[in-house]
Amino acid sequence: DTEVTQTPKHLVMGMTNKKSLKCEQHMGHRAMYWYKQKAKKPPELMFVYSYEKLSINESVPSRFSPECPNSSLLNLHLHALQPEDSALYLCASSQWPGQQEQFFGPGTRLTVL
Amino acid sequence: QQQVKQSPQSLIVQKGGISIINCAYENTAFDYFPWYQQFPGKGPALLIAIRPDVSEKKEGRFTISFNKSAKQFSLHIMDSQPGDSATYFCAAFVQGAQKLVFGQGTRLTINP
């Protein structure tokens, strides 16, 4: 298995909802990443997990809460989001922390009403 | 210094032509330069990458040219096909920060 999977593909939520995005990889990679991508813009790094521990938080608002339950799984918990948080949320993984090759999932298209 | 500047923003090429996208950087600490291809509604896919000790790398129709002294690198797509129509991002890797720094992207359209 050489891919990163993300669920759901699409998500619509209200500003008072709580929802979660899920990312999974079975490549044995020990670094996982969350990115946010707005339309016609490059991906922006949000969080990095190294060996299941949060190693980088790019000053992301607390309404985004990442979680790494095990080495294959990465979640992003969403609460009290704003309409401007609507974007494509991408998960990526690399074989180990600091390894340059990152493999991206297909993303979750999030719309906040 | 952490920026990667990419040009052009958009590019239209006839089928069979050569597509050329350019990137420039300032930070000499970058040590890995990948190109990603992204189709609408999909995640970026690693296309080809180069390290600064190499001046050129070719994989099929895709070639990266790297000029270390000018701090520039470019992607050449030979015999461009309509299926190559996508957004292309150059990037540079900051080893210590574990971070990919992306260019702003180029929307490439190949006309049949």
Image: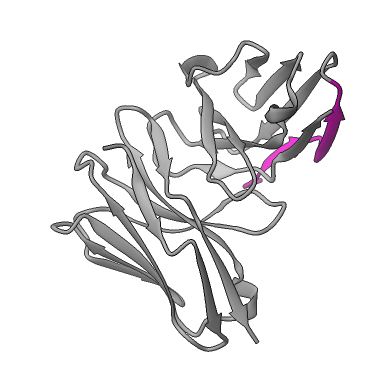
Q: Residue extending furthest left? A: B69
- Residue A12 placed where, x, y %? 86, 31
Is B57 on the left-hand or right-hand side of B19? left
- Residue A18 placed where, x, y %? 82, 15
Where B55 falls versus B15 (above or below)? Answer: above
Residue B45's quadrant in the figure? bottom right
- Residue A94 placed where, x, y %? 49, 37
Q: Is residue B65 magenta?
A: no
Where A52 falls versus A87 (above or below)? Answer: above
Q: Residue at x 60, y 50 (%)?
A: A40
Is B2 on the left-hand or right-hand side of B14? left
**Picture colour scheme:** one colour
Q: Residue extending furthest top? A: A62
Quadrant in which the N terminus of chain A is drawn:
top right
Quadrant in which the C terminus of chain A is drawn:
top right
- Residue B82 placed where, x, y %? 64, 79
Q: Residue at x 25, y 59 (%)?
A: B72
Residue B102's quadrant in the figure? top left
| Front residue (pair A111, A73) | A111
| Front residue (pair B10, B94) | B10
Q: Residue at x 41, y 39 (%)?
A: B100
Is B100 on the left-hand or right-hand side of B38? left
Where B52 falls versus B18 (above or below)? Answer: above
Q: Residue at x 19, y 43 (%)?
A: B28
Task: Give the extent of the magenta segment.
Answer: A1-14
Number of numbered discs overlaid on the protein picture: 0
